[in-house]
Image (cartoon, rainbow, N blue to C red):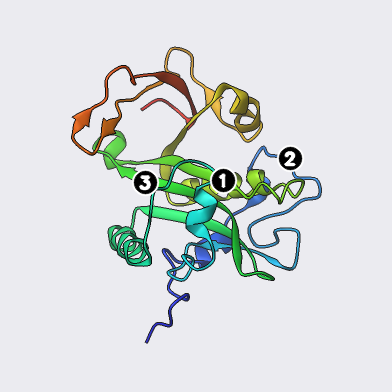
Amino acid sequence: MVVMGEETLYDPSLLLELDFHKSPAKFEPFISAAHPGEPWMKVRPLQDGDYEKGFIQLLGQLTATGTVTKTQFLTRFSQMKALGDYYVTVIEDTRSKTIIGAASLVIERKFIRGCGLRGRLEDVVVNNTYRGKQLGKLIVVTVTLLANHLGCYKMSLDCKDKLIPFYTSLGYLLEPGNSNSMTIRYDGGSKLVSNLTAATNTLSLEGPS
């Protein structure tokens, strides 16, 4: 019988197999998913009990989350786990049992590249009261290395101009002639919202799609 809070979105042993020395990121002092720098920190997959640990509230520091009930959270968690292409990774402060950092690796299954896998980095957020502990760098490098470990030929992300230097320091590059991301947003799930198509910066690891 699985106890609530112990079911993980993916196999946590994957994080122990990552070699942080392969990343161009500079950690001072050196840290990794296995050794995040403080004994009270833990880097791990999202768990079914993280609703109570403030995961949704943390995402609220990044963007609007709307109202998410526990039932909705558990339903989406089960859907993601069943699909097997979602690797939501979190950092927990085990002293307060609070989620203080998160990032998502979403894998796209392609026909190109010999039915290859493409990774996308999404929803990167660190609690703004935990500055100076390299947590943003740690969570991004963790999911970036995880994408490579799982066999992705490419990892991409969209970001604002001010974040380009940060992601560049972690190995991501703006590809000349291939660095625009265009979006259509929908109101209420069906109504097309006009004038919201925009170009933003897309950074990638590896070659073009």
Drawn side of residue 127 relative to residue 185, left or right: right
Q: Residue at x 41, y 64 (%)?
A: 9
The percent coordinates of residue 169 (x first, y second) are 66, 31
Please state which of residues 207 and 101 is positioned toward the viewer in this rendering.
101
Q: Residue at x 45, y 21 (%)?
A: 200
The crowd level at tag 2 (other Cα within 10 Å; few <14, some 14-19, many 20+) is some
Mark 1 is on which residue type?
Val
First in sequence, mark 1 or 2: give its number: 2
Mark 3 is on which residue type?
Ile
The crowd level at tag 3 (other Cα within 10 Å; few <14, some 14-19, many 20+) is many
Q: Which residue is drawn at 65% across and 50% down?
A: 20
Considering the image in quadrants, where does the N terminus appear?
Answer: bottom left
Q: Which residue is drawn at 62% across and 53% down?
A: 19
Which residue has dot 2 on it?
Answer: 26
Total label count?
A: 3
Mark 2 is on which residue type?
Lys
Instruction: Label 1: state its secondary structure.
Output: strand
Q: Do the residues labelled 3 and 2 touch (CB within 8 Å)?
A: no
The percent coordinates of residue 46 (x first, y second) are 47, 62
Confirm whether residue 27 shows in the render: yes
